[in-house]
Image (tube, rainbow, N blue to C red):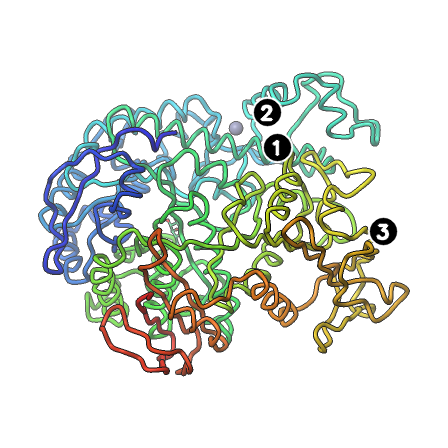
Amino acid sequence: MTSEKSRGILIAERRAGDCIITGMRQKHTLSEMKTGGCTMIGGHLLHGGDYNPEQWIEYPEILEEDLKLMNKANVNCVTLGVFSWAELEPKEDVYTFEWLEEIIDKLRERKIQVVLATPSGGMPHWLTQKYPETLQVQADGTVNLPGKRHNFCYSSPVMRRKVKQIDRALAQRFGKKENVILWHISNEFGGNFKDSTCHCEKCQKKFREWLKNKYGTLDKLNASWWTGFWSHKYTDWDQIHSPSPQGECLTTALTLDWKRFSSEQITDFCKMEADALREFSDLPTTTNMMGFFKGVDYNTLKNAVDIISWDNYPFWHERKDEVPEAVYTSAGNALMRSLKREPFLLMESTPSSVSWRSHNPLKRPGMHMLSSMQAVAHGADSVQYFQWRKSRGGYEKFHGAVVDHKNGSDTRTFREVTEVGKRLEHLSGGIKTFLNRAKAAIVFDWENWWAVEDTSGPRQDLDYVKCVTDHYRAFWECGLDVDFVSMDDDFSGYRLLAAPLNYMYKKGYSEKVRAFVEAGGTYVTTYFSGIVNETDLCFIGRHPLEDVLGVVSEEMDAPSKEFENCFDYNGKEYPAYTMCDIVHAKAKTEIYSVYKKDFYKGCPVVTENAYGSGRAYYLSAESDQRFLSAFYKDVFIKAGLLKEASSADRILKRLPHGVTAAKREDETGRKGLVFVMNFNDRQVRLEGIGKQIDAESGEVYENVLEMAPFSCTILKLK
Ligand code: GLA
Ligand code: ZN
């Protein structure tokens, strides 16, 4: 593991509210840095963002102004070089790093740290002109033309050689610079077009090698992919092609393996970059991920870097009710934290609006602060933006930035950014090693995502992320922190594990769940779970967890709107739609609800089965959010998740609509911060909360907390 290696970490000290870079280089292992009192790179929360001075080289007065304004905006860290390849290597093998060095030095004088990117996200035209084989090929065989970004083949030996060469040169030149704190590898891997993968001949060849390695023999592959269907048995490895709309795209096991392979290719590319940097630099590495991004399995990519970071662009103010977006965004942050179960970095966010949606609303007053605190609340040690200054031209010239085309610092955005910087600075001292230590987890697994949405079957319109985030919302409404785990993770530290739409069971998964429940854990799962193995072969005979769940599925209905079913739960009626599993309960299984209509009237919808020292719940049908919230609340209480362990936990039982909480605490759970967030566009009043102390102002709230619209109050955990 790279994190075991020794890293030189630049330690910055905060003195009297100021960030002072001491220049002292202490040797810490990365794991020491994360557990031994210095979770934050540089010892403070980062505030700043992408800075693209290469676009402004001809405007020295602007570059000077930038530096002054950065100090004014309480910026302590910028990301340089994300798309600077053409300025760093204008001609093949000719490096012009002087401008970058000059800027890094000037930033140091201003006490601003630097996240330095490798430039592979955007290819210079000399590269694609001389080496067209570096360009990506689409699934239908179309060779891409130069342009856009992320447009390269991950297998291309030339691309790899060229990237390695410039990465090594950058690491050699800047790897020991005092204010450079972190490597940012490439940009949003896999973000090209709709398909993140390259289908060129080199990639096809590599894929076949990968398959040979995985299956050993064609017989094994044919059996695993069930190629007897439609006479598609492979008799030669060269008969295998990547999935394509013009060819084989219905052998779902092939598609699954292709996605696994492509994810590994991207990870391997990222690792190649990390290794190149490592030759000359001890600094930690990251790559900016994209939350719930389907193209790359982040449980694979996470292994190529030391620190997780991501880009987060919620669609605020699309609807009057911000809750669905707030839930989705909290889930994204939690997902990123869960990858390494460590603090992560918010690498990009917009200080005002984006420019790439059909319409791009501005963040309403307060929302910038709230959404920034939301990231910190869920484990981020930074609030970084795309970008510092609005480009004058190009595709993103209207994308929100800290500094606008006009008006310098005299803007609402600039003032709100400045406030965020100030707040982070004050929080830095207190947040120490605090992290969300979730007692519940939701299974979110990329391989299951690919499998369940690609399958033909009861429905073609399944939305795994929506289903998972609907379940997550029930936790969010109760202010409970949740980790997202893959099927390969260890569940033993959790009290509750929810696995909605868990269609695929990976090898060893059912055994782990059984042991988890046996030892006292609570397991919640749903319809269309435990159906296939890793190569999309249906389980035959029994469901792998039949004994634990206490139900036996017989048929699966996928009713239309007109045939929607319903059931009662705790005296209220809820709908049953999308998928209605028709199950029989075993003798000892407790039945809470049954279908009220149709030929399966009376069949169980909500069940609980005691198993070992734990219990398992089965939800046979999809229902609405009201049901999920009511159901989970009961489960939380039974699983002991809503106990008032600290006085701040009193708040969790009194959260009104649109208000949530997240807790960052130390390992003992005795010290920490509770972030209470109001996503309503109106003031709310929390009552019956006992005595609470504001962690920032020291103010004491006696039983009542008034929250402004779109605001976050941070309380001391006691
Ligand atoms: C992504 C990219 C940035 C920029 C922003 C705009 O996150 O990494 O370069 O394009 O989107 O929202
Ligand atoms: Zn390729």
Count of picture labels: 3
Residue tagged by mark 1? 258
Badge 3 crowding class, 10 Å Cα cut-off, few under 14, some 14 to 19, many 20 or more, is few
Q: Which mark is residue 554?
A: 3
Which secondary structure lies at badge 2?
Answer: helix
Q: Position of residue 136 (x, y in %)?
A: 51, 33
Q: Quick check: 279 above or below 34?
A: above
Q: CA distance from mark 1 to mark 3?
A: 32 Å
Image position of 611 (left or right of 697): right
Amino acid type, callout 2: Phe
Check whether the beta carbons of the residues at disc 2 and disc 1 lie within 8 A of each other. Answer: yes
Residue for point 47% across, 66% down: 479
Q: Nearer the viewer, residue 466 or 337?
A: 337
Q: Nearer the viewer, residue 39 or 514?
A: 514
Which mark is nearer the camera, 3 or 2?
3
Q: In the rendered view of the protein, which quadrant contains the N terminus?
A: top left
Q: Position of residue 615 (x, y in %)?
A: 66, 54
Q: Nearer the viewer, residue 73 or 388?
A: 73
Confirm whether residue 256 shows in the render.
yes
Which secondary structure lies at badge 3?
Answer: strand
Q: Which mark is residue 207?
A: 2
**Mark 1 or 3 closer to N-term?**
1
Check whether the beta carbons of the residues at disc 3 and disc 2 lie within 8 A of each other. Answer: no
Q: Quick check: 716 above or below 514?
A: below
Residue for point 10% across, 55% down: 15
Amino acid type, callout 3: Glu
